[in-house]
Image (cartoon, rainbow, N blue to C red):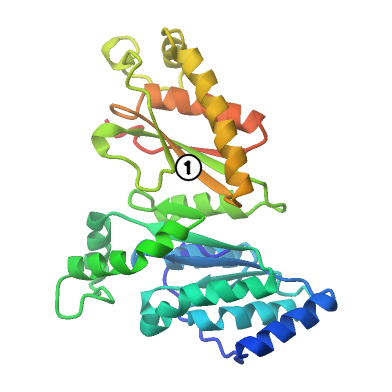
């Protein structure tokens, strides 16, 4: 899979097969026992970290192609299948720089059914404020802003990418991430030797800082008493044993954790049936320091015990 960093400009020269030839070649390869490579499509907002993601996956051993016209994706898969296992994992960066080519993406993804290829879409997201700051810091225009402002280009790009974002298997919000944190997220998802059935990110957050845009599920812990109002607990976080014990000694806290774990087991089974490999569970309290952190730690431990590979992220801990 591709990892996020600075934008790459690799050129790729590949031959193109028409649909009939592609189907014939796929049948021939299948008959010959060819290994169909894994495929990851990396896309998302300009400035959100696609290049970093691509470089990260390249470092993990993926064959990465940047800015490939979508209609050539089936050809890349075909070439990988004929590489005798030398190209087992392909990551393709697809974005609006391809202009008119980008419109062919949905059709190209449908053509991949011919190869019976397992493909995943990683979508990199960021807030408008974060994207504007990044473009201004490098003094580059947004690829879609034309004669307008950066925010005009961002709005146009969001509109173009709306359907693709909805189809994504993994959405990563990079608004508050630096390059190293983004790499750590991608490493956690793609560095394993064997792909697990389901990977989960449990993220604590503070409602006063806004909802995480990449959350699949949101849990509200504000029904529990706030340790912030206990003077001796205020300096600590939910990671500390004192705060965790306080939170889970409150009426309903343990029952809430038990019931929500059961609900996640049901949801996880459905995700597996639908082929969804990633889920982000956002656990929120007022400031993202005490209750949400304590609950996230316990919930992540429960999921891990159930065989779900789990990463814990405390988005807002330390902001106050």
Q: Nearer the viewer, residue 250 or 264?
A: 264
In the image, farthest residue toward the front = 20
Q: How many marks?
A: 1
Q: Nearer the viewer, residue 269 or 243?
A: 269
Q: Quadrant of the N terminus?
A: bottom right
Q: Helix or strand or loop: what does disc 1 sit on? A: strand
Q: x%, y% of residue 23?
A: 69, 83
Whether residue 207 can be seen here: yes
Q: Residues within 10 Å of mark 1 (few under 14, many from 20)?
A: many
Quadrant of residue 247 in the image? Answer: top left
Quadrant of residue 148 in the image? Answer: bottom left
**Residue at point 54% right, 65% down?**
2
Q: Quadrant of the C terminus?
A: top left
Q: x%, y% of residue 57?
A: 57, 63
Q: x%, y% of residue 196?
A: 67, 47
Q: Which residue is mark 1?
A: 280
Q: x%, y% of residue 186?
A: 53, 54
In the image, farthest residue toward the right = 32
């Amino acid at each position: 899979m591709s990892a996020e960093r600075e934008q790459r400009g690799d050129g790729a020269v590949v031959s193109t097969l028409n649909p009939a030839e592609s189907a014939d070649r796929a049948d021939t390869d299948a008959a010959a026992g060819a290994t169909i490579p894994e495929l990851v499509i990396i896309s998302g907002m300009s400035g959100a970290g696609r290049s970093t993601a691509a470089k990260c996956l390249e470092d993990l051993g993926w064959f990465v192609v940047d800015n490939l016209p979508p209609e050539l994706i089936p050809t890349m898969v075909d070439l990988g299948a004929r590489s005798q296992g030398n190209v087992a994992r392909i990551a393709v960066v697809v974005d609006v720089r391809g202009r008119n080519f980008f419109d062919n993406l949905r059709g190209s993804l449908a053509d991949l059914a011919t190869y019976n290829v397992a493909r995943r879409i990683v979508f990199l997201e960021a807030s408008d404020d974060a994207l504007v700051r990044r473009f201004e810091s490098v003094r580059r225009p947004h690829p879609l802003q034309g004669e307008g402002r950066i925010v005009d280009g961002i709005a146009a790009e969001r509109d173009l990418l709306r359907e693709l974002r909805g189809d994504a298997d993994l959405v990563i919000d990079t608004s508050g991430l630096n390059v190293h944190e983004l790499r750590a997220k991608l490493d956690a998802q793609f560095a394993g030797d064997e792909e697990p059935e389901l990977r989960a990110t449990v993220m604590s957050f503070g409602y006063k800082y806004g909802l995480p845009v990449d959350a699949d599920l949101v849990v509200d812990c504000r029904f529990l008493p706030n340790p912030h109002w206990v003077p001796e607990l205020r300096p600590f976080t939910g990671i500390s044993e004192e705060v965790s014990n306080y939170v889970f000694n409150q009426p309903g806290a343990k029952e809430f954790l038990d019931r929500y774990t059961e609900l996640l087991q049901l949801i996880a089974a459905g995700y597996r049936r639908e082929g969804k490999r990633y889920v982000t569970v956002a656990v929120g309290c007022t400031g993202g320091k005490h209750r949400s952190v304590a609950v996230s730690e316990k919930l992540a431990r429960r999921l891990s015990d159930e065989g779900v590979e789990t990463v814990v992220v405390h988005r807002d801990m330390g902001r106050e």
